[in-house]
Amino acid sequence: MFLAAAVQMTSTSDAEANWCQARDLISRAASYGASLVATPENSNYLGPAEEKVRLAEPIGGPTCGRFAGLARELGIHLLLGSFNERRDDDPARCHNTSVLFGPDGQVIASYRKIHLFDVDVSETVRYRESDRIAAGSVPVVADSPVGRLGLSICYDLRFGNLYRRLVRDGAEILCVPAAFTLTTGRAHWEVLVRARAIECQAFVIAPAQCGRHDDEGLRETFGHAMIVDPWGQVLATAAEGPGLALAEIDLDRVAQIRRAIPVAEHFRPGL
């Protein structure tokens, strides 16, 4: 059993302010005893999309270096929910990438967002993430001392087949760093997070962006970072504004629920 923290942030185009906010919240979580801390999507930058591409870095760059150093300093597992990873073969786009660091600061795993947010929320509100982001294609389960973590990002949450794949590959904890819009978040965020926990019989750690940003498209996000257990019970939710959701993770609970209701054994993929 261990304590986990889902961080809630309000990131903007001010990368230094974002770093200071993330560092302070991660450090606070560690001071409470959290050994796994996860930040939201776009932790390091949430501003104009063209700048996101211009400022993109490799995993070995300064942004990941800062988070790796903090994980090492605090002795925690730290998930950088996502940052803008540079693509040398496509200068017009970058990847939206999660990176998991171990307590020694080394990269345990990285995941590039597969499902991109290209939607028409209304006649006037449209999002085209694929204009600046290149989709990943590889589901990732990270094997770590705190458990097997299935990695995903934001819009991935709507695609249950991805999470079934992660569970098939051994995931016990599902990570969903997000920047859900205010409109979609109010309607769907908690429902989807709890649904993934219930159907996958896994813990879900869902860090979130909240409040107003200076991105020309994604101006306001819903927040409500949360941690949900494999029965679908919400264990913790962050209050309004930047903060933390903290809860204990007991992987024996995953095994217990999967034995009691063996969904994986009953699943019929041929239908």
Image (cartoon, helix red, strand yellow):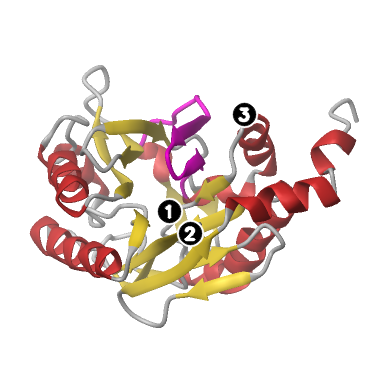
State the CA–CA distance, disc 1 to disc 2. 5 Å
Image height of 159 relative to 46, above or below: above
Res 120 seen here: yes
State left or right for residue 159 relative to residue 128. right
Q: Position of residue 198 (x, y in %)?
A: 72, 56
- SS at circle 2: strand
Q: Which residue is drawn at 61% across and 33% down?
A: 170
Check if residue 221 falls in the magenta segment: no
Image height of 254 relative to 34, above or below: above
- Foreground mark, 2 or 3, reads 3
Check if residue 138 falls in the magenta segment: yes
State the CA–CA distance, disc 3 to disc 1. 20 Å
Q: Where is residue 76 in the image (x, y as percent from the top left)?
A: 28, 50
Residue position marked by numbered label 1 in the rendering: 177
Res 151 seen here: no
Residue position marked by numbered label 3 in the rendering: 169
Of callouts 2 and 3, the N-terminal one? 3
Kindly identify the amino acid type of the residue bearing the numbered disc 2. Ala
Counting the numbered discs, the total is 3
Q: Which residue is drawn at 16% across and 50% down?
A: 70
Q: What stretch is highlighted in magenta?
A: 133-153
Q: Tell me whether circle 3 and circle 1 mark residues in contact (CB < 8 Å).
A: no
Q: Residue at x 44, y 31 (%)?
A: 135
- Foreground mark, 3 or 1, reads 3
